[in-house]
Image (tube, rainbow, N blue to C red):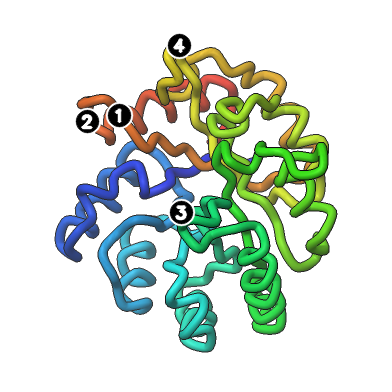
Amino acid sequence: MEIGAQFYTVREHCQNLEDFAESLKKVADIGYRTVQISGTCPFPADWLKENLEKNGLRCVLTHTPPPRLLGEMDQVIADHNTFGCDLVGLGFWAFDPERDMSFEKFMETWPQVAKQLKAGGKYFMYHNHDREFIKRDSKPILQILAETIPAEEMGFTLDTFWVQAGGGDPAQWLEYLSGRVPAIHLKDYAYGRSMAVVGEGNINFARVFKKAEAAGTKYMLVEQDDCHGEDPFECLRRSYDYLHSWGFQ
């Protein structure tokens, strides 16, 4: 399994192309060779390809804005072909009817997107938060999604922090979703429901690593939405050092 950096962690440093390019260099200098692109400014696909290659990086997953997935599918697929990325993700769905983001709306909308991506040679990846652990008919929504949408059409970017925040066991869910978790988010959980540098919180990552490997995970991407005022690049560095101490690169 390879470790990588989820650029949502450093999104505030990627709101123009000049800063984005510098952030790619900083992440590469830490030692990461794999990235997920999410939360940045818009970018031309050939610009990203050039800057990834310049820094010895590969983009293995994106969180692509919903309007692009719903209205620019051909271009989304072409762009991902340009910078060599096969995993295309949806970063958030609230499962909240008052926001027009109900479970029913999800099922009306996103399985078709998944089919379109598959037809274009890409794989749709759904990223969970804690609301997927709301139960419908005695089952967590995450389980219903897995039962309803075929594995060949949708995978899961399982997020360790948000599983724990929803009352789940990250390792157990990796085992349940085996075969459809090619990329996951490593995010630690500290006292007070606080996001932490990987290895500085309380998640049992020994079990996570074991179950992720058994589930066929290829990429473990470090993400820390909130660095609590610390330099996010320093947080990424400490996570890298922790994971490197386990032998991951």
Quadrant housing residue 68: bottom left
Q: Which residue is mark 1?
A: 227
> In the rendered structure, which amino acid carries the disc numbered 3?
Gln
Q: Which residue is mark 3?
A: 36
Q: Sequence-wise, which precedes: disc 1 or disc 4?
A: 4
Tag 3, which secondary structure? strand
> In the rendered structure, which amino acid carries the disc numbered 4?
Tyr
| Closer to us: 4 or 146 | 146
Q: Sequence-wise, which precedes: disc 3 or disc 1?
A: 3
Q: Is label 4 in contact with label 3 (beta carbons under 8 Å)?
A: no
Q: Sequence-wise, which precedes: disc 3 or disc 2?
A: 3
Q: Is label 2 in contact with label 1 (beta carbons under 8 Å)?
A: yes
Q: Position of residue 118 (x, y in %)?
A: 70, 76
Q: Position of residue 34 (x, y in %)?
A: 48, 50
Instruction: Give the residue displayed 47% in from the left and 37% down from the top.
Output: 222
**Alpha carbon distance from label 2 to label 4:** 20 Å
**Alpha carbon distance from label 3 to label 2:** 19 Å
Instruction: Give the residue displayed 26% in from the left and 25% down from the top.
Output: 228
Q: Which mark is residue 191?
A: 4
Q: Is 40 drawn above or below residue 217 in the view shown?
A: below
Q: Which residue is mark 2?
A: 231
229 relative position to 50: left or right: left
| Closer to us: 224 or 112 | 112
| Dot 4 alpha-carbon crowd within 10 angstroms: few under 14, some 14 to 19, many 20 or more | few
